[in-house]
Image (spheres, helix red, strand yellow):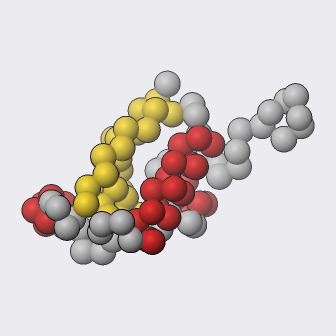
Amino acid sequence: MKTISLRLYIVGDSTFSRTALSNLENLAKRFSDYEFRLEVIDILENPDRATEEKVIATPTLVKHLPAPTCRVVGDLSATDAVVRALSLGTAEPHSDSSTGR
């Protein structure tokens, strides 16, 4: 199983923060071949972490491993772009031979 190490920078319990987290959780379910290691960082509680990572907008998703490091800014609703950025392959869900999907 491949491992992807991610950090999601958010601001509190905002709508954008909840949407980004939900979209990321859905993506992890669709790409179950991967182990997603996610650290959620609220920059209201940890502003220094955002400064260290040079995060200037939220939500921001940062992929650290596997290399190369990349960032996706926004609520992660542009699934194709997120999949490409994380190098997951195709945005199509895995086919289920029993249902033809």
Would you place residue 31 above or below residue 40 in this image?
Answer: above
| Frontmost residue, 75 versus 2 | 75
> Horizontally, is 98 left or right of 72 in the view?
right
- Can the viewer see residue 85 in this picture? no
Image x and y of residue 35, in percent: 46, 32
Task: Tell me if I can see residue 53 in this picture.
Answer: yes
The residue under the point 21% across, 65% down is 43
Q: Residue at x 89, y 35 (%)?
A: 99
Horizontal arrangement in the rendering, residue 38 relative to residue 84 (left or right): left
Residue displayed at 58% across by 49% down: 26
Q: Is residue 23 above or below residue 35?
A: below
- The location of residue 59, given as percent across then percent down, is 37, 67
Q: Which quadrant would the C terminus be assigned to in this image? A: top right
Choose between 51 and 10: the one closer to the eye.
10
- Residue lying furthest bottom: 57
Q: Residue furthest front?
A: 13
The outermost residue toward the top is 1
Say above or below: 26 vs 96. below
What percent of the width, then of the height, locates residue 11? 29, 68
Q: Position of residue 66 (x, y in %)?
A: 36, 40
Name the side, left or right, on which 73 lies relative to 30: left
Give the tally of numbered discs. 0
> What residue is rendered at 70% in x and 45% in y?
93
